[in-house]
Amino acid sequence: MAKDIFLLNISGQDKPGLTSGLTSVLAQYGAKILDIGQANIHDTLSLGMMFEIESGPKSSAVQKDLLFKAYELGITAKFKPISLDDYEHWVNLQGKDRYIVTILGEKLAAEQISKVTNVISEKGLNIDSIKRLTGRLSLVRTEEYPRASIQLSIRGRIDNKTELTEKFMQISHDLDVDIAFQEDNIFRRNRRLVCFDMDSTLIQTEVIDELAELAGVGNEVRAITESAMQGEIDFNESFKRRMKLLKGLSEDVLQQVAENLPITKGARRLVDTLHSYGFKTAILSGGFTYFGNYLKEKLDIDYVYANELEIKDGLLTGSYIGDIVDGNKKAEYLQLLADKEGIDISQTIAVGDGANDLQMLNLAGLGIAFHAKPKVKDNAQSSISSIGLDGVLYLLGYHDRHIDLLD
């Protein structure tokens, strides 16, 4: 028996009962729905349905009744006939690779979206859907913490992923926007462990610099810290040099520094949301366990791996206990925790800002350079520089409504 295929496009003011009314007409004629999708912007509906119907009288009648129902509902209906060859070609495209592009910023401008989508088009990729992840911004009320994010689901064959990500990075640099590119696979939808660097990531300071100020050697230590974070000198060597400069500092100042740690904007929102959805969290830091454990209690972090200060007679000795937690160690601990939690390394996320974070960022299923040094941004999978730490949630595909309902 011959069949006709139609794409029905509906537009107009949204109201209850639209989908029910239209599908009830299709049901009367035994139509088979092949695909359906809907979007709603400012109470204006855009609904698409592709359906198959028996050719002949039924095909003509269902179109007439759908047009009548649309008139009755106060909406516009348009039909487009689809050939069997076109339909099968469309079906075969579904097997192509799928990717997610997330765009983040305080506000998103048309130019930013235009540049990103132009790159996608140039590569012959198709955008299947666009989804807003953040709540709508007021135009009359000043937002204390403005942020905007959209997620593009794309598909197609990518011959050179490096070239694509380089183009996105250039747009990010030129237009002050964050662009993350990920494969849309089973691991992305099943992340389970998030590991954070501490200094300049989970907190907005370098603790060793704070201690150095109190020890009267601030300038010397800051210069070494900056050089290490830029990757100009070996982390272990820089760590030993800085530790020696802290010799003689009183243990009493540690609590004072801990109580005044500036926690990064969005950190609490991020960690609370992660825990609510069953994630485990960890601090993997080249800083110190004293401060990592303080944050562990304050933010309810699950694991802490960092350096342990050596203290004798109430004074820092200028040395440390155990191995130095450098870049290699951070990556080792990331793998250790993945094994401990019984998950694949692809189900992990690592977030950091310095050169000593690159090993764990590149090992993790998703590595995110957060307000990072240029060398780190250039070598990480993804980066966030425009908003707070809770931007990680948008890279995971969470919408504000998934987050705010937990408050």
Image (cartoon, rainbow, N blue to C red):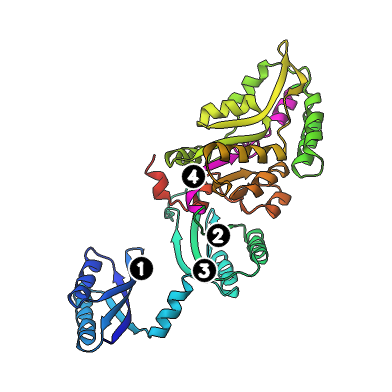
Name the mark nearer the viewer: 4 or 2: 2
In the image, is 241 to the left or to the right of 301?
right
Residue 244 lies, with reference to residue 178, above or below; the image says above
x 57%, y 40%: residue: 338
Q: Are marks 2 and 1 in contact (CB under 8 Å)?
A: no
Q: Are marks 3 and 2 in contact (CB under 8 Å)?
A: no
In the image, is 185 to the left or to the right of 174?
left
In the image, is 319 to the left or to the right of 103?
right
User: How far apart are labels 3 and 2 at the CA level?
Assistant: 10 Å
Which of these two is toward me, 327 or 333?
333
In the image, is 404 to the left or to the right of 14?
right
Name the mark nearer the viewer: 2 or 1: 2
* Residue 83 lies in the magenta stretch: no
Which residue position is annotated with label 3?
155
Q: Is residue 31 visible?
A: yes
Q: Please, what is the three-letter code of the amino acid marked with disc 4?
A: Glu
User: How far apart are labels 1 and 3 at the CA level?
Assistant: 17 Å
Looking at the picture, how far across and down is residue 60, in whole percent? 22, 87
**SS under mark 4:** loop
User: How far apart are labels 4 and 2 at the CA level?
Assistant: 33 Å
The single residue placed furthest to the top in the displayed view is 313
Which residue position is annotated with label 1?
37
**SS under mark 3:** strand
Read off the magenta span: 188-214
